[in-house]
Image (cartoon, coloured by chain):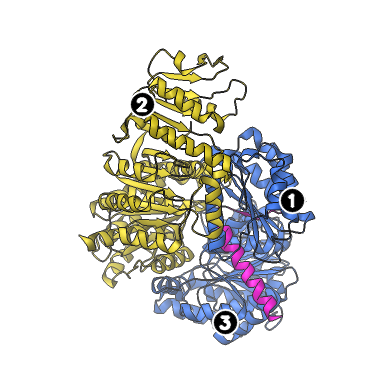
Chain colours: A yellow, B blue
């Protein structure tokens, strides 16, 4: 009987073979199909076995009736068997030498019913006795592009520097989807549910040591061992940027968390002060989480809080300046000397040249826009730049020009060593999105941080800057 | 010489004829074309004249060289002549008996230059002397679907109950676009810029008395006469719901406002207390503005703050409960008796039945979902319902079923006299949007208030509820 108790979790993320237990022939809507489809879509390289006492086959893959019937070794099992059959499955897996089992199945302690609690305790006990590590139950398991493991056919196939540990399967997919179109990619993602064996601290310890992971995201409803979690979090935050979303911070949220993953939630004050003490970036929604990851990933650290806001629209200029200053960032006025310089080639009417710099009337003159960006980037009075743009104003036939402008703006800001981000205002109507998409893809492929509102840009950049300041203050 | 000094502003919104002054034959990108295209797209019914000293024609419409050459009366003029030619135009219009001129042109006091300030003072003086009312300069003028006036070809052609007064042309379009896909329609919209003659108080007074207008939105950078504005706002807020976004609330924003519309911005504290005292709904971004208008328009007043959150996803349930309780709303737990009732036809595993009610596992069973909605709607422990849904989970072939579910849910909530809103999480990828759009259109045509994030729904509903509570407290 193989086990790796106390060893690294590496085998979980890089199994040589996987079996899906509980696959159903009859119901193509069932979860088992999600896992099967995802592993095939990702071209998981090792052998992939299906197991169900009823036998049969799915898309040409034989279904074994018992684990014992599988001729080769099985490393890792994804199980969708009903809660009542979970313990029996562990016994079977133990005989087969399986290292880890991920239980997708719900119906355990999160129900709040005696029976569910008992079944989960039984699982935990079996894990200890057999040495088989358990992920879950009641979760989606592992997404690791590097080993071609996924629980969703649509996730990106490329790896990236973000590791994500999430107690909720839905929020795992929710966060990945929110950032994938903005260019963020992941090293390892774990949806771990009720955590009857492996818990948040185990995964956090692993990601903190994982060289592929530079940024760590956490969605936590409740922790199993507060002392150990605090210690692990402290260590992780010393080495990597950590973003944390605590679910169940209010009474209603805590009640939902108890029903969702059987978690005891803990008070808001405790979590706030924990994050402050350890230098964790605390967020309160998946949107804010996504904005923070985009900032950490693509906004190379600005030296300070002084921003030049360059874009189109007088009313937009007013509102973006308000948002940035209200978030504790500074929008310093351009010195007269620099304004005069820009005015040499820029008409006054309809343009604002003080910072914010409203370039409405000159959007059709890329050379002058780029000259302005060059002058402002090189001004020592600012630390970073924001380019804001309402895509509804841009015609389809102007998109080529806009893509060239992006290249120019990026070149200028990089030459001046000033980070730059773009705030794009768009709409959800199909015509608008179709028009905008290639533009957004261009921004993403240029590794430009993209935000969809003034508020979210200002808020996320402030969060990350405050985090950097605390780190520097400590160093 | 006709004028209507001191009379109602009605003729501005319902002119019998319009002339476009300063139209250019050479440059089809010019603003004049925007106005011409919009008036034609909206099929403005009165005669439409073009005026430019150079003469010529555009799409078969003759361009008169002088106003005097136009054989009939001209009520209303939209001018894009350069700032220097503005005064001459007023003189010409005075002889023609024009009632009002809207100056789109920029280059006046907002430049901060002596010359621009002088030209604007001259305009104001001419307005007083001739009796011609001026909108602007430096603005987009009037959008009034009822009289088929528009400055944008894409605005909705139907009227609605929202009046909007905005100092910024860009923010005017920005707000209209943000709410039009969510079903909000407008009575009268005025982009009024530098306000050298007609100002925010004039238009506010008009909308307060306008029977077509039930809700008033204001985007203000600075006011001309603080005392009169306060009085007018007070009166308007006593009769209608008023939402206000103050631009230029920070130092950077105020600097931008000065350059944008020549406004002196005033401090944040003064505006905050003004809004509190007068019962104005104060917002801080166009997104929050849009959410508040959607709430006022489509969320019939809930009797209180107690919400039932019904939707799909355990993690989503936790986060939405947190957002609503953090915004001061209450998510009361379902009594055991009601939970038992729902459990009779709902499996426990994967569903949360406490409020929030996570219906993940039963989304494919519309009858049971609707039974649950009926039971909860009729429970006296709640005042309104939220249905939350991640559209990424819904397959294209399920959209028909989803549309039927909406009808059912709406019927149940209306039968129980409990308002309901929907929070839809979506993505901006073209495939996703294409899939979602017909679903969203269905929600809109059913007059369901739609929000795109938990945060924005909770925030806007709290803003409107707080506003209602203040009104009731006063009554």
Comparing A469 with A61, the one in front is A61
Taking the image as shown, residue A90 lies to the left or right of residue A341, namely right
Residue depicted at x 31% and y 49% = A232
Q: Disc 2 to disc 3, how far (Cα)? A: 83 Å
Place of residue A20 in the rendered image (x, y in percent of width and height, measured from the top left):
48, 24
Query: Which region of the structure is painted magenta?
Result: B447-475
Name the chain under label 1: B
Residue depicted at x 50% and y 34% = A104
* Neighbourhood count class around disc 2 (C-alpha, 10 Å): few under 14, some 14–19, many 20 upward: many
Place of residue A462 in the rendered image (x, y in percent of width and height, measured from the top left):
36, 61
Q: Quadrant of residue A94?
A: top left
**The N terminus of chain B sits in image quarter:** bottom right
**Both marks 1 and 2 on one chain:** no
Residue closest to the far right: B415
Q: Is residue B245 above or below residue B274?
A: above
Q: Which residue is labeled 3 in the image?
A: B126
Name the chain under label 2: A
Place of residue B328 in the rendered image (x, y in percent of width and height, measured from the top left):
57, 66
Q: Disc 1 to disc 2, how far (Cα)? A: 48 Å
Q: Which residue is labeled 2 in the image?
A: A15
Q: Which residue is labeled 1 in the image?
A: B375
Q: Secondary structure at mark 3?
A: helix
Q: Secondary structure at mark 1?
A: helix
Q: Earlier in the sequence, mark 1 or mark 3?
A: 3
Taking the image as shown, residue A396 lies to the left or right of residue B360, namely left
């Amino acid at each position: 009987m193989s086990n790796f108790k106390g060893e690294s979790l590496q085998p979980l993320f890089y199994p040589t073979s996987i079996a899906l237990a509980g696959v159903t022939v009859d119901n193509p809507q069932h979860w088992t199909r999600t896992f099967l489809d995802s592993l095939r879509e990702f071209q998981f390289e090792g052998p992939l076995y299906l197991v169900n006492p009823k036998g049969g086959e799915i898309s040409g893959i034989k279904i074994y009736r018992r684990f014992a019937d599988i001729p080769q070794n099985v490393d890792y099992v994804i199980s969708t068997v009903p809660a009542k059959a979970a313990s029996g499955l562990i016994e079977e897996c133990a005989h087969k030498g399986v290292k880890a089992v991920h239980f997708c199945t719900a119906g355990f302690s999160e129900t709040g019913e005696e029976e569910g609690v008992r079944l989960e305790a039984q699982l935990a006990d079996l894990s200890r006795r057999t040495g088989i590590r358990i992920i879950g139950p009641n979760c989606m398991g592992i997404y690791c592009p590097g080993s071609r493991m996924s629980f969703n056919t649509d996730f990106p196939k490329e790896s990236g520097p973000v590791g994500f540990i999430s107690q909720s399967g839905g929020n795992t997919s929710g966060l990945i989807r929110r950032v994938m179109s903005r260019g963020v990619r992941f090293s390892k993602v774990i949806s771990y549910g009720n955590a009857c064996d492996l818990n948040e601290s185990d995964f956090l310890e692993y990601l903190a040591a994982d060289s592929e992971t530079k940024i760590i995201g956490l969605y936590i409803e409740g922790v199993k061992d507060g002392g150990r979690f605090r210690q692990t979090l402290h260590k992780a935050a010393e080495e990597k940027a950590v973003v944390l979303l605590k679910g169940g911070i209010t009474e209603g949220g805590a009640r939902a968390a108890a029903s969702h993953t059987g978690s005891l939630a803990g008070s808001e004050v405790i979590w706030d002060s924990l994050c402050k003490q350890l230098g964790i970036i605390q967020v309160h929604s998946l949107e804010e989480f996504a904005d923070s990851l985009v900032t950490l990933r693509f906004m190379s650290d600005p030296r300070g809080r002084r921003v030049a806001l360059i874009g189109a629209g007088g009313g937009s200029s007013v509102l973006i300046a308000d948002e940035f200053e209200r978030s504790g960032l500074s929008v310093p006025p351009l010195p007269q000397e620099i304004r005069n310089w820009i005015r040499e080639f820029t008409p006054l009417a309809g343009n604002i040249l003080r910072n914010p710099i409203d370039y409405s009337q000159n959007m059709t003159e890329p050379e002058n826009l780029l000259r302005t960006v060059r002058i402002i980037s090189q001004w020592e009075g600012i630390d970073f730049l924001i380019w804001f743009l309402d895509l509804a104003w841009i015609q389809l036939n102007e998109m080529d020009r806009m893509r060239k402008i992006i290249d120019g703006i990026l070149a200028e800001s990089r030459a001046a060593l000033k980070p730059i981000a773009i705030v794009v205002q768009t709409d959800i109507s199909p015509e608008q999105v179709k028009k905008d998409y290639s533009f957004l893809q261009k921004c993403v492929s240029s590794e430009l941080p993209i935000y969809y509102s003034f508020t979210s840009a200002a808020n996320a950049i402030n969060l990350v800057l405050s985090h950097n300041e605390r780190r520097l203050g400590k160093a």
